Image (cartoon, rainbow, N blue to C red):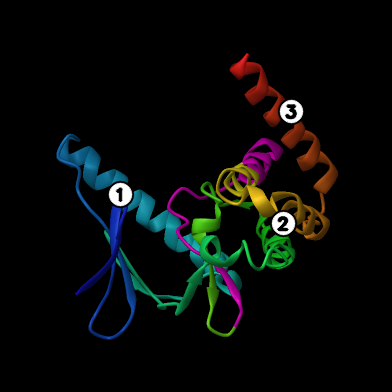
Amino acid sequence: MKIIGRGAEAITYVNEQGFLVKKRESKKYRLKILDDKIIKTRTKKEVKLLKKLEKHTPKVITSNETEIVMEYLSGVLLKEIIDKEPELCKEVGKIISYMHDTNIVHGDLTTSNIIKKNNDELKLIDLGLGKVSKRYEDKAVDLHLFKESLISKHHKIFNKAWTFFIENYNPEEKDKIITRLNEVELRGRNKKK
């Protein structure tokens, strides 16, 4: 078992068959009955989201109450290449448009959660914080998270990357989502004061 990563809730590893496995681990500080329910619910929810977005995510092979077995994507994380290829944000904008039009919110939309496969196709990964939502607020927060990841980690190419993204982010209700994004950002600025 080759461990790929360890997050707050799960470990990811490649199994003997070459598939990626995301296994949620128990938290000792939670009551067992509550822990079991949280793990089961979150795993089931993530599987549903992955299947709804299958065109833009790893394909789910199988799952149970604690783990998801999915296609292993060979490639590189967007965060590792975007400084040299900011134009990739054009495709990110199109993918997020599709996701938001299907009323799915990623919940952790950063350059660390997008992978460029060896065939140059971009895929979203780690929908553990994702959910189904029609709320403009939730979609705006997705955009805010992505924007903040560009500002904090890719500031040299931020303007170019964000322009590429926003020009290609065209969900049906773009104007309402962008208006809400501006409100979200204003709230953040007011907190700093």
In this rendering, which labeled residue sits more in front, label 1 or label 2?
2
In the image, what residue occupies the spot 82% across and 54% down?
A: 172
State which tag comes first along the sequence, 3 or 1.
1
Residue 124, by quadrant, is: bottom right
User: Can you identify the residue that label 1 sits on?
Assistant: 9
SS label for mark 3: helix
Give coordinates of residue 87: x percent, y percent: 73, 66
Pick whichever, 3 or 46, lies toward us: 3
- Within 10 Å of disc 1 (Cα), the crowding (few <14, some 14-19, many 20+) is some
Q: Which residue is denoted by mark 3 in the rendering?
A: 183
Measured from the top left, where is residue 49 in percent x and y? 51, 60
Foreground disc of the pair 2, 3: 2
The Cα atoms of the two marked residues, 1 and 2, are separated by 31 Å
Q: Is residue 65 visible?
A: no
Residue type at the position of mark 2: Ala
- Magenta segment, which residues? 120-144
Q: Is residue 108 left or right of residue 33?
A: right
User: Pointer 2: what residue?
Assistant: 161
84 magenta-colored: no
Task: Check if mark 3's residue and mark 1's residue have beta carbons within 8 Å.
Answer: no
Residue 56 in view of the camera: yes
Taking the image as shown, residue 178 lies to the left or right of residue 66, namely right
Figure quadrant of the N terminus:
bottom left
Residue positioned 24% across, 38% down in the render: 34
Under tag 1, what secondary structure? loop
